[in-house]
Image (tube, rainbow, N blue to C red):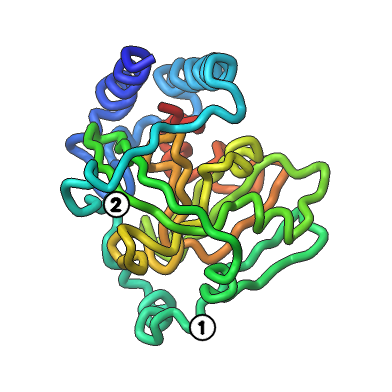
Amino acid sequence: MPKFQLNRRRFLTTATLSASTLALSGCDAFDFLADRDNGVRNVLEGANDLTYRVQRLLAGRESLAQEFTEADIRQPQRPNGITAPDDSVYKSLQSGDFADWRLEVTGLVEKPLSLTRQQLMNMPSRTQITRHDCVEGWSCIAKWTGVPMALVLDAAAVKPNARYVVFHCLDTIERSLSGEVKYYGSIDLVDARHPQTILAYGMNGMPLPVENGAPLRVRVERQLGYKMPKYIHKIELVDGFGAMGLGKGGYWEDRGYDWYGGI
C-alpha cells in the first residue's frame, strides 16, 4: 500500500501539475487544462475515474487514514494556499473574532441550518492526529479538532437524492474583469460521512489559525490537501455539479486536477 500511495503522489505532482512551481490553494499553472477539448485533460479525467473506482475497491468505505501520536508532531502545520484572505467580508468577520460568522447548510436538505462557531463547538467533537499530504509533494503532521461532518449532515436531514457536499469559501482565489471567484470544492457523501471527516475549528490544541483556515476548514484525511477547503461559510448538498464552476466539482478540478484526490 505505501508504494501505491507514493506512485500516486508522483503522478499527481509530476504528470498532472508539476506543483512545486505553483501557488495558491494548489497551483495555477497548466491553465491549458481548463480547455474541455484538451486531449491531456481528457486522458487525466479517464485516469481519475479509474483511480477513484480502484481505490474505493481496495480501501473500502470505512478504512481509516493513519493516525499518529503527539510525539510525531515535530513542526508547526505548514499552511497551504491562501494564508490571509483580503476579502472585505472575511476581514470584517475576523475583526470581530468571527462572532458574526455562520455556517450555512443548504441545498438538498430537509432542515437548512445556520450554525455559529460556538454551536459547532458544543456538538460532540473528534480529535485526530493525521498527516496532511499536499499535491506539491510535502507532508506535515498535526492534531485537528472538530465536529464530525456526519453529525451536521444528520442534523440537516439530507434528502435521498443528494450525492455530493459542496464547500463554499470566503477567500477569493481568482480576480478578473468578469469578477471575483471564491474557492469551492466538493466530496461525495461516502467521504463526507467517513468517521475521520471533520469540520475543524482547532489545531494542535489551539483555535484554528487564520493561515490554516479559520474559523472552519474541512479535514478529509483520505485525500490530498486541495480536497480540504479552508475559510468555509456554506455547505451545500447537491445531486450534481452542473451549476458549479465548469462542472467538474471544484476550482482546481475545473483546471485539470483529479476530482478524487485519494492517497
In this figure, which residue is indicated by the disc labeled 2?
A: 81
Horizontal relation, residue 123 to residue 251: left or right: right
Q: Name the element at disc 1.
A: loop
Where is residue 198? Give x, y as percent.
52, 51
Distance between mark 2 and mark 1 Cα atoms: 24 Å
Report the amino acid beneath label 2: Gly
Could you classify mark 1 by the number of other residues whose Cα lies within 10 Å: few (under 14), some (14-19), or many (20 or more)? few
Where is residue 170? Give x, y as percent.
45, 66
In this figure, which residue is indicated by the disc labeled 1?
A: 100
Observer able to see residue 175:
no
Q: Name the element at disc 2.
A: loop
Relative to 233, is 229 above or below? above
Residue lying furthest bottom:
96
Horizontal relation, residue 192 to residue 96: left or right: right
Relative to 167, is 56 above or below? above
Relative to 21, is 16 above or below? above
For discs 2 and 1, the disc positioned in front in the rendered view: 1
Q: Assign the N terminus to one quadrant of the image.
A: top left
Where is residue 56? Give x, y as percent.
57, 21
Observer able to see residue 211:
yes
Task: Look at 74% across and 60% down and name the residue there.
Answer: 156
- In the picture, residue 162 is in which quadrant? top right
